[in-house]
Image (spheres, helix red, strand yellow):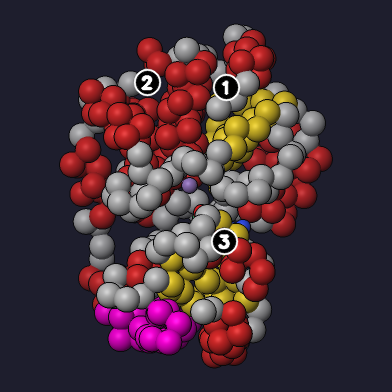
Amino acid sequence: MMQKHEIEAIKLALATPKRIAIIPHRNPDGDAMGSTLGLYHILKQLQHDVVVIAPNEFPDFLAWLPESEKVMVFERSFDKCKAILEKAELLFTLDFNALHRTGDQMENLLKTLTATSVMIDHHQAPDGYATYTFSDTAYGSTCQMVYDFIYQLGYENLLNKTVATCLYTGIVTDSGGFRFPKTTSATHKCVADLIDRGINNSEIHNLLFDDSTYNRLLLLGKALQNLKILNEYKTSYITLSQDELNEFGHQKGDTEGIVNYGLSIKGIDFTAIFIENKEEGIVKISFRSQGAFDVNQFARTHFEGGGHINAAGGKSFLPLEETVQKFIAILASEKK
Ligand code: 5GP
Ligand code: MN
């Protein structure tokens, strides 16, 4: 939780209309978009001049979120976003722990800004760049933190169906549908409150999860064909090459969630997906584990990444095949 004097200071800052920018991480997911838009809809009701600025495009499966069409994209509208950020009197950075998670160009700009800033995030090892830091890894989602933040500020009367819809989105996506270990009674109490505030939770699930294209299912089929098991390390992994992505007309967001299939096999407690990105010249990697195996540490140590104990990501500048070989070599030297 935030300290009382910090909450008072933020309340004071919000007592008069301000120019406010809210920033999610690069490649924003349901929690990043849900938390930024949820807070946006609160601050708008308080008559602030507020805009969400995403580092890059957000996936289509989140495009139904209320007023997502007003989200500005830094990579697409660089000059406009730069001007807004430089004029902002208050900055919120949500769902990330270090400015580099916004990408090089945006990080360089954010570093020059002197406006008061508030970080709300549930990742490990937060950088100390913000004026006020609300960081707690006990939370399963930033959306649930924003929910508590709203109550701490005494703005719960503004928590309408629109805000609640945004927050529910991040809670349900980051908790894997209420199944990951950080799902607590507080999570369910929060969701009960959101339902009482009018959200249509069943419809939100449909919008989020029953929105596949045929090509996306075919890509999932290809990914499952590529799934390999390393029984001796209780590990599985999936690869998707750029050619395979192209074959199925890959769209942003199509690979979301595929990594979890590798963990659904009996006896497997660690899995990874390696996704080739020729345009960026990298292999983007997602890691998932069950139990004590710390994939945040694994991603940090070996693949320039990070995240949480059971869900993390990273990248490799080696070709796809060599990246997989490096992965297997690391397993051989350190896993069990
Ligand atoms: P995902 O695999 O779903 O992209 O990410 C899983 C978790 O790891 C998320 O919390 C995400 O923010 C974090 N994560 C993913 N990629 C990176 C990365 O390259 N660096 C860091 N520090 N965290 C990452
Ligand atoms: Mn999150």
Look at mark 1 in the image and give the residue it sits on.
Answer: 49
| Dot label at residue 159 | 2
Q: Quadrant of the N terminus?
A: top right
Q: Is residue 333 left or right of residue 89?
A: left
Instruction: Please tell me whether residue 240 belongs to the stretch shown in magenta.
Output: yes
- Estimate the x, y position of residue 312 in percent, counting from the top left: 52, 61
Q: Residue at x 23, y 23 (%)?
A: 196
Disc 1 versus disc 2: nearer the observer = 2
| Dot label at residue 169 | none
The one of 102 and 58 positioned closer to us in this rendering: 102
Which region of the structure is painted magenta? 220-246
Disc 3 versus disc 1: nearer the observer = 3
The relative height of residue 90 versus residue 22 in the rendered view (above or below) is above
Look at mark 3 in the image and give the residue it sits on.
Answer: 296
Q: Is residue 178 left or right of residue 307?
A: left
The one of 324 and 180 positioned closer to us in this rendering: 180
Which element type, helix, strand or loop, lies under badge 3? helix
Q: CA distance from mark 3 to mark 1?
A: 37 Å
Q: Is residue 252 left or right of residue 130?
A: left
